[in-house]
Amino acid sequence: MARTSTLPRWAAHHLAAVRVVLALTLLVGLAYPLGMTLLARAPGLRDASSRETLVGRAYTDSKGNPLPGYFQSRPSNAGDGYDTAASGAGNQGAESVVDTPDKPSLLTQVCARSKAVGELEDVDGSRPYCTPDGVGAVLGVFRDGGTTGRVTHVVSLNQVCPARPFVSSYERVVVGCAEPGADYSRAVVTPVRGDAPARPEVPADAVTASGSGLDPDITPAYAGLQASRVARERGIGEDTVRALIAQYTTGRALGVLGEPAVNVVELNAALDRTHPSRGA
């Protein structure tokens, strides 16, 4: 005759729950971490698991200016930049086009970065929807019908007085600069594309941060844009620098996933080993 449990139903339920907790603790809390640790120490993976080149870094001086003899990383929103304890994004999206007193819009950040990169690399840093002075080209348009009707007043929202507006007039109304502290909430926000090329010379990864803020990679296009400057500052041929870029460029994962990328940390370290920077 089969034995029947003499435990009360509530006790049997609690015992089953305890067994599940113990099993998950052993599996997830012990077996999985141990397995991942052993896998990371496997040949071919052991070195990569501990290399500092998996996290990017900024190549700037104490004042935040780019070191001219080094390839520059993409921007970072992790703390003060590439802070592993503050990994994260800027939490601003495509609609972030108007600056606030305490924080520039995403558009203005992109415009300012593109202008700075253009000046550093001696190329055209202009972009659509950016003013020549490096802020978002956005008008606040007031109409007598609210969102429709005749234009009565126009302000360049991101150019605070006494800055000169990037356009003199809009629909035959003179454009003014933004007065500090003024309320423009009733204005129709109107980005202006301008005459910048549809494909800017400064690549997108040079002006936008990664989701983690720790990405050590840039595109081959951004690396190529910097090759001439780095070669000049290190006193070597540009062909030598471009060969190193190719050496530290990885292709798409499995041939189809992601995009080719250049690890800036590895590339700069290789340059320091083979051709030390005169300004380092």
Image (cartoon, rainbow, N blue to C red):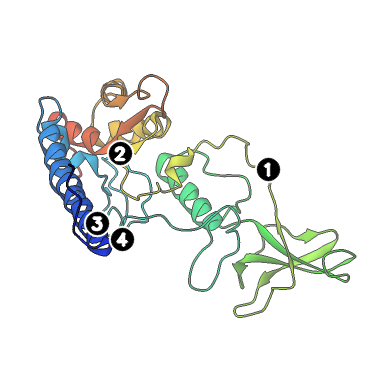
Q: Residue at x 26, y 26 (%)?
A: 248
**Distance between the alpha carbons at the discs numbered 4 and 3:** 46 Å
Asked if the residues shown at circle 1 and circle 4 are in contact, with their CB atoms under 8 angstroms apart, the answer is no
* Quarter-of-image position of residue 80: bottom left
Q: Quadrant of the C terminus?
A: top left
Circle 3 SS class: helix
Specify whether 135 is left or right of 1. right
Look at label 2 and name its amino acid. Answer: Phe
Say whether disc 3 or disc 1 marks the residue closer to the N-terminus. Answer: 3
- Amino acid type at mark 1: Asp
Q: Position of residue 196 (x, y in %)?
A: 63, 42
Q: Which numbered marker is on residue 195?
A: 1
Q: Which mark is residue 246?
A: none
Circle 2 sits in a helix, a strand or a loop, which is it? Answer: loop
Please tell me whether mark 1 or mark 4 is closer to you in this view. Answer: 4
Image location (x, y in percent) of residue 101: 52, 73
Q: Which mark is residue 71?
A: 2
**Residue 163 shows in the view:** no
Tag 1–tag 2 contact (CB < 8 Å): no
Instruction: Work out whether 131 lies above or below 32.
Output: below
* Kind of element beneath mark 4: loop
- Residue denoted by label 3: 17
Q: CA distance from mark 3 to mark 1?
A: 67 Å
